[in-house]
Image: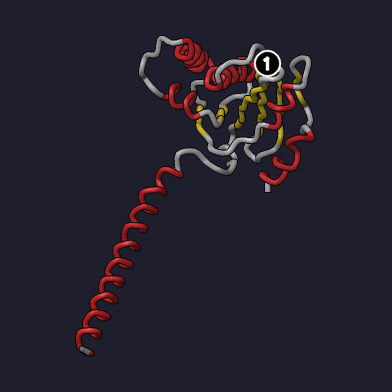
Amino acid sequence: MWNKVTDAKTFVLSRAKDSLHEWKLARNLQQTDFVPRQQHGNIYWTKPNAGRYKCNIDASFSKHLNKVGLGMCIRDEHGAFVLAKTDWFSPICEVHIGEALGLISTLEWVHELNLGPIDFEMDAKRVVDSFLSSRHDVTEFGIIIQNYKTLFRHYYENSTVEFVRRQANELAKVALLSTSLQVLFEIPDCIENTLINEML
């Protein structure tokens, strides 16, 4: 009887150890599989390479105001504030269309500034993926994307459009409350702490 109980305990313990080992292996595989996905788009803001600028773009949507607010912030290779702009349009639209229109507005504005090579960043993955895709899209969204591809080819030969997972839309929220577009020559209060922390 004693031997049967001991054998049963040994069997259960052995099965438990095997199960735990298999669970650890499966978990390690899941974590390994998850890491590359995190690398598509930075979580933290990074400075552009020497001699380049970076422009972060975001949009904010208000059903109550029936408006889309746009915020754009340009920084230099040291992460220092250069210029910012807020703008808005109405009526409100689908998010991906609003984000795409925000990018076109930014491209037109930055072109007038004639700054040189610039990297555009936004958290609108669908917009960035469509820009990088060679697929032809005949929807309203596709036509907007095609327009900004044309602008980009003409004026931004050495520049990039990138997806970032982290984006602060404080400027875009401020834009919703504005009556007209604003070009800001000093760091706006709403993003001052963020910019200073990211320069360190």
Give residue 58's position: percent from left, percent from top. 62, 27
Please tell me in which quadrant of the rendered image residue 129 appears: top left
Instruction: Identify the residue under disc 1.
Output: 66
Res. 151 in view: yes
- Residue 10, relative to residue 76: is it above or below? below
Q: In the image, is 129 to the left or to the right of 174?
A: left
- Residue 58, relative to residue 167: is it above or below? above
Residue that appears at 77% across and 27% down: 185
Residue that appears at 72% across and 43% down: 196
Give residue 51's position: percent from left, percent from top. 59, 34
Q: Amino acid at mark 1?
A: Asn
Res. 154 in view: no
Give residue 45's position: percent from left, percent from top. 59, 41
Secondary structure state at the residue bearing disc 1: loop
Please tell me in which quadrant of the rendered image residue 21 appears: bottom left
Q: Residues within 10 Å of mark 1 (few under 14, many from 20)?
A: few
